[in-house]
Amino acid sequence: GENVEQHPSTLSVQEGDSAVIKCTYSDSASNYFPWYKQELGKGPQLIIDIRSNVGEKKDQRIAVTLNKTAKHFSLHITETQPEDSAVYFCAAFISGNTPLVFGKGTRLSVIA
Amino acid sequence: DAGVIQSPRHEVTEMGQEVTLRCKPISGHNSLFWYRQTMMRGLELLIYFNNNVPIDDSGMPEDRFSAKMPNASFSTLKIQPSEPRDSAVYFCASCSGGWAEAFFGQGTRLTVV
Protein backbone atom coordinates (compact mmCIF):
# COMPACT_ATOMS: atom_id res chain seq x y z
CA GLY A 1 0.00 0.00 0.00
CA GLU A 2 0.84 3.67 -0.06
CA ASN A 3 3.45 5.00 2.36
CA VAL A 4 4.00 8.72 3.00
CA GLU A 5 7.16 10.04 4.62
CA GLN A 6 7.22 13.61 5.97
CA HIS A 7 10.16 15.78 7.05
CA PRO A 8 11.06 17.46 9.26
CA SER A 9 9.09 16.35 12.31
CA THR A 10 9.63 19.73 13.97
CA LEU A 11 10.47 23.11 12.48
CA SER A 12 11.08 26.45 14.13
CA VAL A 13 11.28 29.65 12.12
CA GLN A 14 11.41 33.35 12.91
CA GLU A 15 8.31 35.35 12.12
CA GLY A 16 8.51 36.60 8.57
CA ASP A 17 10.78 33.80 7.36
CA SER A 18 9.68 30.98 5.08
CA ALA A 19 8.93 27.41 6.09
CA VAL A 20 9.20 24.35 3.87
CA ILE A 21 7.85 20.89 4.64
CA LYS A 22 8.61 17.96 2.37
CA CYS A 23 6.86 14.65 1.74
CA THR A 24 7.55 11.60 -0.38
CA TYR A 25 5.14 8.89 -1.38
CA SER A 26 5.62 5.37 -2.61
CA ASP A 27 2.70 4.53 -4.89
CA SER A 28 2.96 6.11 -8.33
CA ALA A 29 -0.81 5.67 -8.72
CA SER A 30 -1.44 8.38 -6.09
CA ASN A 31 -2.87 11.43 -7.80
CA TYR A 32 -4.22 13.75 -5.12
CA PHE A 33 -2.10 15.38 -2.42
CA PRO A 34 -3.79 17.48 0.26
CA TRP A 35 -2.19 19.31 3.14
CA TYR A 36 -3.90 19.62 6.51
CA LYS A 37 -3.28 22.00 9.40
CA GLN A 38 -4.08 20.89 12.92
CA GLU A 39 -4.33 23.47 15.66
CA LEU A 40 -4.26 22.54 19.31
CA GLY A 41 -7.37 20.70 20.43
CA LYS A 42 -8.87 20.55 16.94
CA GLY A 43 -9.13 18.13 14.09
CA PRO A 44 -7.00 18.53 10.97
CA GLN A 45 -8.33 21.00 8.40
CA LEU A 46 -7.55 21.12 4.71
CA ILE A 47 -5.50 24.17 3.76
CA ILE A 48 -4.45 23.41 0.20
CA ASP A 49 -4.32 20.49 -2.19
CA ILE A 50 -2.77 19.60 -5.52
CA ARG A 51 -3.69 17.07 -8.16
CA SER A 52 -1.31 15.06 -10.28
CA ASN A 53 -1.93 17.04 -13.44
CA VAL A 54 -0.56 20.20 -11.82
CA GLY A 55 3.02 20.96 -10.80
CA GLU A 56 2.42 23.92 -8.51
CA LYS A 57 -0.46 25.67 -6.80
CA LYS A 58 -0.48 28.84 -4.77
CA ASP A 59 -2.96 30.39 -2.36
CA GLN A 60 -1.78 33.67 -0.83
CA ARG A 61 1.18 32.81 1.43
CA ILE A 62 0.89 29.06 0.90
CA ALA A 63 2.14 27.10 -2.08
CA VAL A 64 2.51 23.43 -2.90
CA THR A 65 4.75 21.82 -5.48
CA LEU A 66 4.57 18.32 -6.88
CA ASN A 67 7.22 16.29 -8.65
CA LYS A 68 5.56 13.11 -9.89
CA THR A 69 8.73 11.68 -11.35
CA ALA A 70 10.52 11.87 -8.03
CA LYS A 71 7.33 11.16 -6.08
CA HIS A 72 7.67 14.08 -3.73
CA PHE A 73 5.66 17.16 -2.89
CA SER A 74 6.28 20.14 -0.66
CA LEU A 75 4.44 22.82 1.27
CA HIS A 76 5.88 26.33 1.29
CA ILE A 77 4.69 29.01 3.69
CA THR A 78 6.08 32.50 3.12
CA GLU A 79 6.08 35.46 5.50
CA THR A 80 5.23 33.20 8.41
CA GLN A 81 3.10 34.53 11.24
CA PRO A 82 2.59 33.26 14.81
CA GLU A 83 -0.85 31.94 13.85
CA ASP A 84 0.83 29.58 11.37
CA SER A 85 2.12 27.63 14.37
CA ALA A 86 0.44 24.22 14.22
CA VAL A 87 1.00 20.64 13.14
CA TYR A 88 0.92 20.16 9.38
CA PHE A 89 0.15 16.85 7.69
CA CYS A 90 0.68 15.87 4.11
CA ALA A 91 -1.38 13.07 2.59
CA ALA A 92 -1.64 11.05 -0.59
CA PHE A 93 -4.67 9.55 -2.23
CA ILE A 94 -5.37 7.10 -5.04
CA SER A 95 -8.60 7.89 -6.83
CA GLY A 96 -11.57 5.75 -5.98
CA ASN A 97 -12.97 4.87 -2.61
CA THR A 98 -9.64 4.63 -0.83
CA PRO A 99 -8.69 6.63 2.24
CA LEU A 100 -6.05 9.29 2.59
CA VAL A 101 -2.66 8.08 3.79
CA PHE A 102 -1.05 10.68 6.05
CA GLY A 103 2.50 11.56 6.85
CA LYS A 104 3.45 11.69 10.51
CA GLY A 105 3.17 15.44 10.73
CA THR A 106 5.43 18.46 11.19
CA ARG A 107 5.13 20.66 14.25
CA LEU A 108 5.79 24.20 13.05
CA SER A 109 6.62 26.90 15.56
CA VAL A 110 6.79 30.51 14.41
CA ILE A 111 8.76 32.59 16.86
CA ALA A 112 7.73 36.23 17.15
CA ASP B 1 -24.01 22.07 8.29
CA ALA B 2 -22.34 21.74 11.70
CA GLY B 3 -19.54 19.62 10.33
CA VAL B 4 -18.52 16.20 11.58
CA ILE B 5 -19.71 15.80 15.15
CA GLN B 6 -17.98 13.50 17.60
CA SER B 7 -18.94 12.63 21.13
CA PRO B 8 -17.78 12.63 23.78
CA ARG B 9 -14.96 15.18 23.47
CA HIS B 10 -13.15 13.64 26.42
CA GLU B 11 -13.46 10.21 27.98
CA VAL B 12 -11.63 8.89 31.01
CA THR B 13 -12.24 5.27 31.86
CA GLU B 14 -10.72 2.48 33.85
CA MET B 15 -8.88 -0.37 32.26
CA GLY B 16 -11.23 -3.18 31.34
CA GLN B 17 -14.25 -0.98 30.78
CA GLU B 18 -16.10 -0.72 27.50
CA VAL B 19 -15.75 2.55 25.62
CA THR B 20 -18.00 3.74 22.81
CA LEU B 21 -17.08 6.69 20.62
CA ARG B 22 -19.69 8.26 18.39
CA CYS B 23 -19.61 10.11 15.10
CA LYS B 24 -22.13 11.94 12.97
CA PRO B 25 -20.74 12.60 9.49
CA ILE B 26 -21.64 15.52 7.28
CA SER B 27 -24.97 14.96 5.58
CA GLY B 28 -24.54 13.68 2.05
CA HIS B 29 -21.04 12.33 2.58
CA ASN B 30 -20.79 8.66 1.65
CA SER B 31 -17.38 7.82 3.08
CA LEU B 32 -16.49 7.74 6.77
CA PHE B 33 -13.11 7.14 8.36
CA TRP B 34 -11.93 6.47 11.90
CA TYR B 35 -8.36 7.57 12.72
CA ARG B 36 -6.32 7.30 15.89
CA GLN B 37 -3.67 9.91 16.69
CA THR B 38 -0.74 9.40 19.02
CA MET B 39 2.60 11.14 19.36
CA MET B 40 4.48 8.02 18.35
CA ARG B 41 2.42 6.89 15.36
CA GLY B 42 0.76 10.06 14.11
CA LEU B 43 -2.59 9.62 12.35
CA GLU B 44 -3.40 5.96 11.84
CA LEU B 45 -6.38 4.82 9.81
CA LEU B 46 -8.37 2.26 11.78
CA ILE B 47 -11.31 1.54 9.49
CA TYR B 48 -13.32 3.17 6.76
CA PHE B 49 -16.84 2.82 5.43
CA ASN B 50 -18.27 3.55 2.04
CA ASN B 51 -22.04 3.82 1.78
CA ASN B 52 -22.28 2.40 5.33
CA VAL B 53 -20.33 -0.73 4.38
CA PRO B 54 -16.95 -1.42 6.04
CA ILE B 55 -14.37 -1.52 3.27
CA ASP B 56 -11.08 -2.01 5.07
CA ASP B 57 -10.60 -2.68 8.76
CA SER B 58 -7.00 -3.82 8.52
CA GLY B 59 -5.96 -0.88 10.67
CA MET B 60 -8.00 -2.01 13.65
CA PRO B 61 -5.32 -2.98 16.15
CA GLU B 62 -7.05 -5.90 17.84
CA ASP B 63 -10.29 -7.76 18.17
CA ARG B 64 -11.04 -5.50 21.12
CA PHE B 65 -11.84 -2.81 18.58
CA SER B 66 -15.03 -2.83 16.55
CA ALA B 67 -16.86 -0.26 14.45
CA LYS B 68 -20.34 -0.04 13.04
CA MET B 69 -22.23 2.26 10.75
CA PRO B 70 -25.92 1.35 11.01
CA ASN B 71 -27.00 4.25 8.79
CA ALA B 72 -25.59 7.12 6.78
CA SER B 73 -25.70 9.55 9.69
CA PHE B 74 -24.12 7.61 12.53
CA SER B 75 -21.08 5.50 13.33
CA THR B 76 -19.58 4.06 16.50
CA LEU B 77 -16.15 2.83 17.45
CA LYS B 78 -16.14 0.50 20.42
CA ILE B 79 -13.25 -0.75 22.52
CA GLN B 80 -13.97 -3.68 24.80
CA PRO B 81 -12.12 -4.19 27.06
CA SER B 82 -10.11 -0.97 27.06
CA GLU B 83 -6.42 -0.87 27.96
CA PRO B 84 -4.07 2.01 28.92
CA ARG B 85 -2.29 1.74 25.55
CA ASP B 86 -5.56 2.65 23.85
CA SER B 87 -5.19 6.18 25.22
CA ALA B 88 -5.12 8.51 22.22
CA VAL B 89 -7.20 11.03 20.31
CA TYR B 90 -9.69 9.34 18.01
CA PHE B 91 -10.89 11.23 14.96
CA CYS B 92 -13.79 10.60 12.68
CA ALA B 93 -13.73 12.10 9.17
CA SER B 94 -16.13 12.05 6.26
CA CYS B 95 -16.02 12.94 2.60
CA SER B 96 -18.17 12.65 -0.47
CA GLY B 97 -15.76 10.32 -2.19
CA GLY B 98 -13.33 10.65 -5.05
CA TRP B 99 -10.97 13.57 -4.75
CA ALA B 100 -13.19 15.42 -2.32
CA GLU B 101 -11.91 17.04 0.84
CA ALA B 102 -12.04 14.92 3.99
CA PHE B 103 -13.58 16.83 6.90
CA PHE B 104 -12.50 15.90 10.40
CA GLY B 105 -14.40 16.09 13.65
CA GLN B 106 -12.94 17.68 16.77
CA GLY B 107 -11.83 14.29 18.06
CA THR B 108 -12.37 12.32 21.25
CA ARG B 109 -9.51 12.30 23.71
CA LEU B 110 -9.56 8.90 25.38
CA THR B 111 -7.63 8.23 28.57
CA VAL B 112 -7.63 4.72 29.98
CA VAL B 113 -6.26 4.52 33.51
Image: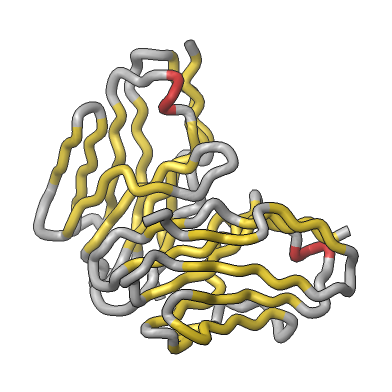
Q: Is residue A33 left or right of residue A100?
A: left
Examine the image and state in which quarter residue A84 appears. Answer: top left
Is residue B94 in view? yes
Residue at 60%, 81% (x, y): give it: B67
Q: How is the image coloured?
A: secondary structure
Q: Is residue B67 left or right of residue A46?
A: right
* In-front residue for pair A7/B95: B95
Indicate the position of residue A52 as horizontal and vertical percent values: 16, 60
Q: Residue at x 30, y 53 (%)?
A: A34
- The count of marks equals 0
Q: Judge from the rendering whether residue B105 lies leftward or rightward of residue A27; answer left or right.
A: right
Looking at the rendering, which quadrant does residue B98 occupy? bottom left
Q: Residue furthest front?
A: B1
User: Does residue A100 show up?
Assistant: no
Q: Is residue B41 left or right of residue A108?
A: right
In the picture, which quadrant includes the C terminus of chain B? bottom right
Please say if A65 is above or below B50.
above
Residue at image coords 39%, 57%: B103
